[in-house]
């Protein structure tokens, strides 16, 4: 008889866990940001059920060099995305990404601070845990150690929930997903991803607060 742990480590079990984690994004019982609290709990439980530890999620201690890497990656990624990739995508789709959902942040300090907290929980921590640490581990069980394919597939999964931003936003998020995936493959430390992602979104929300969403147009 196949044990539960053996099944969960089989490619079918891994696919099921990944599908369940993705499906929780759309569950009707919770709302942002609490949806990702549920997803985080599910990932921790599922990972422990598979391997009896959380090691494969890559929660590793940050060194001084890691903080330097974080700053360099944040600055480089922002520069390339803001001044090269996103303008090219906007031109290709003949429209900018639709960030109108964040327009209400302009001048609203309370909402801005609330969104910052929510963002660090759901986008920075939750999305990186789901679309990088957990997705990478499950995809490796499903298709093997095909690193480039895993990065691409995880970027696709990452971009899909951002369809509300339009096709340009979807494409932009996909490229961000490729970058975050490459970052995770390179340093194998989810904290680096979480902090870089959080800094990028903090800048975005800050620009929205000061009324500069047009910067991304």
Image (cartoon, rainbow, N blue to C red):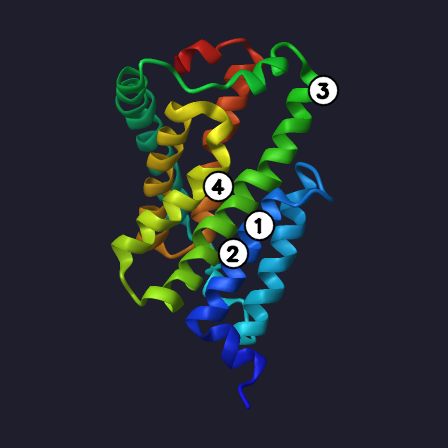
Label 3, secondary structure: give it.
helix
Quadrant where the image shows the C terminus: top left
In this rendering, is residue 157 above or below 95? below
* Mark number displayed over residue 6: none
Residue positioned 28% across, 25% down in the render = 85
Label 2, secondary structure: give it.
helix
Q: Earlier in the sequence, mark 1 or mark 3?
A: 1
* Mark number displayed over residue 195: 4
Residue positioned 45% across, 30% down in the render = 200
Give the distance between the C-alpha atoms of the residues marked 2 and 1, in whole angstroms: 6 Å
Label 2 crowding class (10 Å Cα cut-off): few <14, some 14-19, many 20+? few
Left or right: 166 as drawn, with respect to 117: left
Residue positioned 31% across, 47% down in the render = 152
Label 4, secondary structure: give it.
helix
Give the distance between the C-alpha atoms of the residues marked 3 and 2, in whole angstroms: 35 Å
Residue 40 in the image: state x and y as whole percent: 61, 53
In this rendering, is residue 123 above or below 212? below
Contact (Cβ within 8 Å) of mark 3 with mark 2: no
Near-viewer residue (9 or 119): 9
Residue 78 in the image: state x and y as whole percent: 36, 27
Which residue position holds label 3?
110
* Mark number displayed over residue 23: 1
């Amino acid at each position: 008889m196949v044990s539960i742990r053996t099944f969960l480590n089989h490619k079918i079990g891994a696919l099921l866990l990944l599908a369940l984690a993705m499906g929780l994004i759309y569950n009707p019982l919770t709302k942002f940001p609490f949806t990702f609290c549920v997803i985080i709990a599910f990932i921790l439980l599922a990972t422990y059920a598979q391997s009896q530890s959380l090691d494969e999620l890559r929660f590793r201690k940050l060194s001084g060099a890691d903080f330097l890497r974080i700053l360099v990656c944040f600055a480089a990624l922002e520069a390339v995305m803001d001044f090269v990739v996103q303008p090219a995508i906007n031109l290709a789709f003949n429209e900018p990404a639709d960030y109108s959902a964040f327009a209400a942040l302009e001048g609203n300090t309370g909402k801005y601070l609330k969104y910052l907290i929510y963002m660090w929980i759901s986008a920075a921590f939750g999305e990186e845990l789901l679309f990088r640490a957990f997705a990478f581990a499950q995809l490796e069980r499903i298709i093997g150690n095909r690193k480039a394919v895993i990065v691409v597939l995880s970027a696709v999964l990452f971009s899909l929930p951002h369809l509300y931003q339009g096709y340009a936003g979807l494409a932009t998020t996909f490229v961000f997903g490729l970058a975050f995936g490459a970052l995770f493959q390179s340093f194998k430390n989810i904290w680096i991803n979480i902090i870089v992602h959080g800094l990028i979104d903090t800048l975005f929300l800050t620009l929205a607060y000061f009324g500069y969403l047009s910067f991304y147009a």
